[in-house]
Image (tube, rainbow, N blue to C red):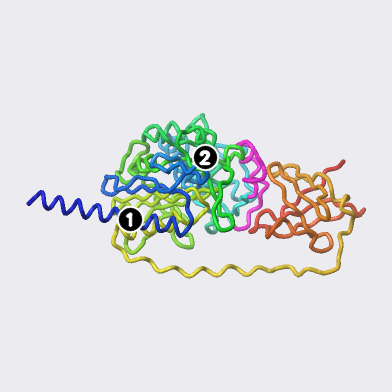
Amino acid sequence: MKFIVLLVLWAGSLAAQADLETYIQSAMKGMQVPGAAIGIVRDGKIVMARGFGVRDSKTGQPVTADTQFAIGSCTKSFTALAVGIMVDEKKLDWDRPVREYLPWFRMYDPVATELITPRDLLTHRSGLPRHDFIRFSTPLAREELVRRIRYLPNNTTFRDHYQYNNLMYVTAGYLAGVAAGSTWEDLVSDRIFKPLGMNNSTVRVADMRKAADFATPHDYAGDGVRPIDFYDYQVFGVGPNGAVNSSVNDLLKYVQFYLNGNQKLVSPATRAELWKPVTVTPEAAYALGWNVYSDRGHKVVAHGGAINGFTAHITLLPDDRTGIVVLNNLGSGFPSVVAQGLMERLLSLPPVKERPERPSRPRNEPRRIPNTKPSLPLSAYVGGYSHPAYGTIQVTQNGEGLRVAFAALTVDLKHFHYDTWEFGRGRGLAQFELDAEGRASRLLLPLEPEAAPLTFERMVK
């Protein structure tokens, strides 16, 4: 009789596994995902750890549970944990001003300069909008990038409300590295990866690409998908906001660290602090590197990640002792959609109805004045222009238009009217200002949608 009961349970488990796999494969097909890796742990046991599809659409190599994927902003929980390790060692305090540890640190807002703490850095309430353009255009060493944050204007009052900000996580990671007498990279590798046995995880793209098993990033192109270039966080100094690369097998160890109440890395007090809600968001609350919310009575601790050609999602259900890891090698919504679907299936919840999209704020599109021309010949706008955060950029002539060259990318300027130009495709309008002698002396660029254009001063020849 006991054998029959076990057989029935085993058959039911296989059926449930098959149902999950069918769901995953269907979602992959619908979103054209080349490859994915899924990990599920329940009650301390691994329910699933496997790959689906291919890690590179050109080579056709299969994804495995050991395939490394970039996990993007899922990295933020690692950075918060690294800060927590330093808090336990009394080298940092969640609520002491950053300037006590980095006396030179400044924000654009003097109030934020005086008051901002590690907790503020990690909970998206600095008052600073994203300013992400610098993360793709201007290669900088991490300390230099943190020093230049003072030149990036805020758009809201400090601690006023939630504004997701990667640069604050760069600052937090840099701070933790300084406190450790090391770097963020070594701190995460030595104090998180090694103790947890995450031996197939890296914090550098160069190391990931040396691994025997790693995924290639892809993006949509026409009716299909195509491989694209890797984004190298190290080149731009921004590793702490998203540079972790890992596999499902390794991330399940990380998930179990949280679900099992393992105090191997931090004290119980610090571990609890990481999940304590701080900033109210549109859908939930943001703790230290994690979103925290309730879904039909079930506590959820989760975070997503996205970077060129990769998206990821980690979901923890602590009261249900369940964790879900979803990785894929496409810039898609697959991980968040599938994580939600798997959670509903595992907890026997009805599918959630699609939420209506929140209406976007109306944009005040400037009206173009027809039949105008620039005030000066195109050659008169050519030259170097400088901003203290971005350094010197070059404006060059490009046929009947102009082109702006940053250190790592170029953006075309197409004439709009008078001395106003379209900055790339859909990025906004750039404007040249003339001095009293009629020379182009400034260039205003819309580099942050939520803030005023940044002013680049013409370099004196």
Q: In the image, 352: left or right of 438?
A: left
Identity, as a three-letter code, of the amino acid under mark 2: Gly
Q: Quadrant of residue 155?
A: bottom right
In the image, is residue 312 part of the stretch drawn in magenta?
no
Residue range in magenta is: 133-156
As measured in the structure, the alpha-carbon distance from the residue carrying label 2 to the one carrying label 1 is 37 Å
Mark 2 vs mark 1: which is more N-terminal?
A: 1
Residue matched to label 2: 173
Q: In the image, 300: left or right of 426?
A: left
Q: Between tags 2 and 1, which lies in front?
A: 1
Q: x and y percent of residue 71 in the render?
A: 47, 45
* Figure label count: 2
Residue 323 tag number: none
Residue furthest top in the image = 181
Visible residue check, residue 270? no
Identity, as a three-letter code, of the amino acid under mark 1: Leu
Identify the residue shown where x is 36% and y is 45%.
Answer: 50
Q: x and y percent of residue 157 in the render?
A: 59, 57
Identify the residue shown where x is 65% and y is 46%.
Answer: 134
Binning the other alpha carbons within 10 Å of mark 2 as few (below 14), some (14 to 19) or many (20 upward) gives many
Q: Quadrant of residue 246?
A: top left
Question: Label 2's element?
Answer: helix
Question: Label 1's element?
Answer: helix
| Along the viewing direction, whichever of 292 and 406 lies nearer the viewer | 406
| Along the viewing direction, whichever of 11 and 337 lies nearer the viewer | 11
Residue 449, compared with residue 110, is above or below; it is: below
Residue matched to label 1: 20
Q: x and y percent of residue 80 in the render?
A: 46, 43
Binning the other alpha carbons within 10 Å of mark 1 as few (below 14), some (14 to 19) or many (20 upward) gives some
